[in-house]
């Protein structure tokens, strides 16, 4: 299992097929999924497809991906962080999703900070973006704390066939 990043409290590593139970707990929780795509929890089938896709993309993308985060001290899975192409755009997006029991402890801020540092210092990106549902105040707070700037609301479409959704757009460029 390949370790990717370390923060003060977290180890961020590649996902494996054995993370299915972790991802299932995350993506079938209605509260976690409230502001993600259609706002509905995923089915078991969808979670199986997601974990396979996440793992396959390590090969496809090499430097981008979604990686599992665990507490260094205990090895407990808390969720994931990502830095990857934003579908339907030429942008690179930072993302995160944590199990509810681990909200409110600063983990999202800690992991997202590492994603930004990796994007700028290692990958030399010139811009990183993020989109959130307008109601997702916790996520918007995280993005602001990490240094992203809100540029406004836009209609976003991940593919030409997908329905348009209204999102808040954030971005950051290297200092
Ligand atoms: C968004 C999410 C990752 C935040 O994780 P977290 O570890 O609790 O975030 P942090 O503790 O680093 O910071 C959260 C900040 O938002 C604030 N916050 C939390 N809930 C809030 C709410 N409902 N309204 C406004 N602010 C809120 C916290 O007070 C904290 O700010 P502070 O440090 O100034 O007090 C977590 O709620 C989550 O996984 N949600 C479900 C998935 C999701 O929405 N992902 C993002 C998609 S864009």
Image: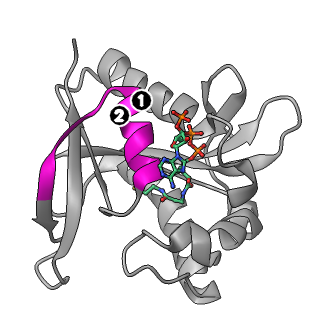
Indicate the quadrant containing the N terminus: top left, top right, bottom left or bottom right: top right
Residue located 15% across and 78% down the image: 164
Residue located 65% across and 75% down the image: 29
The image quadrant of residue 69 is top right
Whether the residues at callouts 1 and 2 have beta carbons within 8 Å, the answer is yes
Judge whether 138 appears above or below 110 on screen.
Answer: below
- Camera-nearest residue between 124 and 143: 143
Residue located 48% across and 67% down the image: 53
Q: Where is residue 71 shown, x and y percent of the image?
A: 77, 36
Q: Which mark is residue 144?
A: 2
Judge whether 72 appears above or below 18 on screen.
Answer: above
Alpha carbon of mark 1 to alpha carbon of mark 2: how far?
4 Å
The image quadrant of residue 83 is top left
Q: In the drawing, does residue 86 fall left or right of residue 100?
A: left
Q: In the drawing, does residue 125 fall left or right of residue 36?
A: left
Q: Which residues are magenta?
A: 137-153
Q: Where is residue 86 shown, x and y percent of the image?
A: 25, 55
Label 1 neighbour load within 10 Å: few <14, some 14-19, many 20+: some
Q: Where is residue 56 shown, x and y percent of the image?
A: 48, 60
């Amino acid at each position: 299992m390949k370790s990717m990043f370390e923060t003060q409290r977290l180890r961020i590593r590649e996902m494996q097929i054995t993370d299915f139970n972790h991802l299932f707990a995350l993506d079938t929780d209605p509260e976690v999924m409230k502001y993600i795509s259609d706002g509905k929890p995923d089915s078991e089938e969808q979670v199986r497809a997601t974990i396979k896709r996440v793992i396959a993309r390590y090969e496809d993308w090499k430097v981008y991906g979604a990686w599992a985060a665990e507490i260094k001290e205990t090895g407990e899975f808390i969720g994931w962080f990502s830095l990857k192409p934003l579908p339907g755009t030429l942008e690179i997006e930072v993302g995160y999703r944590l199990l509810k029991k681990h909200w409110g402890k600063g983990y999202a801020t800690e992991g997202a900070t590492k994603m930004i540092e990796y994007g700028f210092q290692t990958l030399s990106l010139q811009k990183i973006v993020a989109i959130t549902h307008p109601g997702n105040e916790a996520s918007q707070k995280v993005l602001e704390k990490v240094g992203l700037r809100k540029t406004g609301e836009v209609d976003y479409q991940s593919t030409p066939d997908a329905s348009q959704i209204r999102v808040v757009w954030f971005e950051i460029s290297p200092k």
